Amino acid sequence: MAQAAAISLWDASAEERALSSPMTGDCATELAIVGGGFTGLSTALHAAERGIDCQVLEARQIGYGGSGRNVGLVNAGLWLPPQDVRKKLGEKRGAALIKTLGEAPGYVQSLIERYQIRCEVTRSGTIHAAHSPKGYQDLARRAEEWQRLGAPVDLLSREAVGELIGSEAFYGGLVDQRAGTINPMGYVRGLARAAQNTGAKVATGVTAKRLRRDGDGWVVETDSGNVTAKWVVLGTNAYSDDLWPGLKNTFTPIHYFQLATEPLGERGRAILKSGQGLWDTGPIMFSLRRDAFGRLIIGSMGTVIGGMHGLSRRWAERTLRRLFPDLGKVAFEECWDGQIAMTPDHLPRIHRLAEGLYTPIGYNGRGITPGTIFGKAMAELLAGGREEDLPLPITELKPVKSAPFMARLYQMAFTANQLWKSI
């Protein structure tokens, strides 16, 4: 049988072994988890640690969705500045979420260490780079609030950030020392290994077809048998389908694409020389980082257009040439894209869909830390915790009526951006 094509560079290069475990026939468990990404596997690991019997159901392979296609920046906080989070959630809940997600990179790193997850982890921080003077003003506002809260963040001048990045193209930057980078597929596979070794059952190639109430519990009907459970957690985020009516209509799906160069060796040493990952303040964000083998991974919003030899490659070549004029011509090895679940207010959600049925969703491109933390919170809740102690208040499903139109509009804008910056 021919080997399936890699879904991303991370799929091809991850040191952690790909877990493949079918489910045959009906089974019963306390907790059924749909989705083998950051949220689902963090839920499984933390539930198993608390003695809860659980079964993960992944339709494809571990990390097939956003988790295996992620940029791999282990960032603190959310898309929004912390003062805006407090404004939207209120002082008490907002401050609690800011604290929890501010500490989240450290928690992710502690899991990596505890379970010896092989995922190319770095702890050298990330750089939020100003694409314009206005972008720098936004970073200054963020820095002021994070520093007031005691976070180890530094606002750097154009010259100082240029020295770190190896480029004079930015107007300054915010360095967050709490953050870092990982191979996201290595991390999610490591979570699967840890969950399985702790007692969770993890099945791949199993598609959940229908959810139905059965007495005080649930039945998850799949193409490989029925799973009877007391509780169900849906960890599908941007890859949610029609399993629960209306769930996929609660966010706007957008795409994010990436291309990876060949290992650059000495040629690339001066680029992000301290190992930080980078994203910018542009309205159509772009990202840049290195992997453990010296590749540059560059990406932006939108889909891969034209494969390895089309528009997206030209965009990547021109962007690298603009940022690093002395780099010269580079070859590319991989290209891929994935989906992000964007909510109208850029805040994630935790929904109780019905009694004993929950879903954390809407990470707005910040899947690694919220996915890990919200999975842990789900396990704590089901082990006897209170909904009031969840990182976010429980909210009801609210469809985003403009989502189909906005998704098409965004895609048109992202394609135009690739075209304009390739000229």
Image (tube, helix red, strand yellow):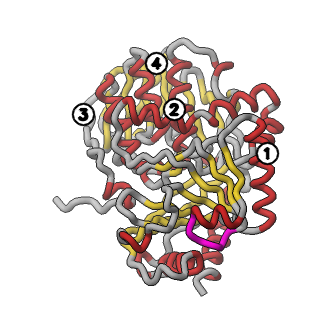
Q: Are marks 4 and 1 in contact (CB under 8 Å)?
A: no
Q: Regarding mark 1 in the picture, which secondary structure is present there? A: helix
In the image, taking residue 197 as reference, residue 338 lies left or right, namely right
Tell me the mark number nearer the camera, choosing from 4 and 1. 1
Foreground disc of the pair 2, 3: 2
Give the residue pinned by disc 4.
230
* Quadrant holding the C terminus: bottom right
Whole-number angstrom distance, CA of label 4 to CA of label 1: 46 Å
Q: CA distance from mark 2 to mark 3?
A: 35 Å
**Mark 4 against mark 2, which lies toward the viewer?**
2
The image's mark for residue 107 is: 2
| Residue toward you, 94 or 20 | 94
Measured in 3D between alpha carbons, the distance from the residue under mark 1 to the one under mark 2, in whole angstroms, is 24 Å
- Foreground: disc 1 or disc 2: 1
Number of other residues with Cα within 10 Å of mark 2, as a class: few under 14, some 14 to 19, many 20 or more: some
Q: Residue furthest left?
A: 1
- Residue at image x 33%, y 43%? 118
Q: Nearer the viewer, mark 3 or mark 1?
A: 1
Hey, which quadrant is residue 399 in on the image? top right
Q: Point out the stretch of residues depicted in magenta.
A: 165-170
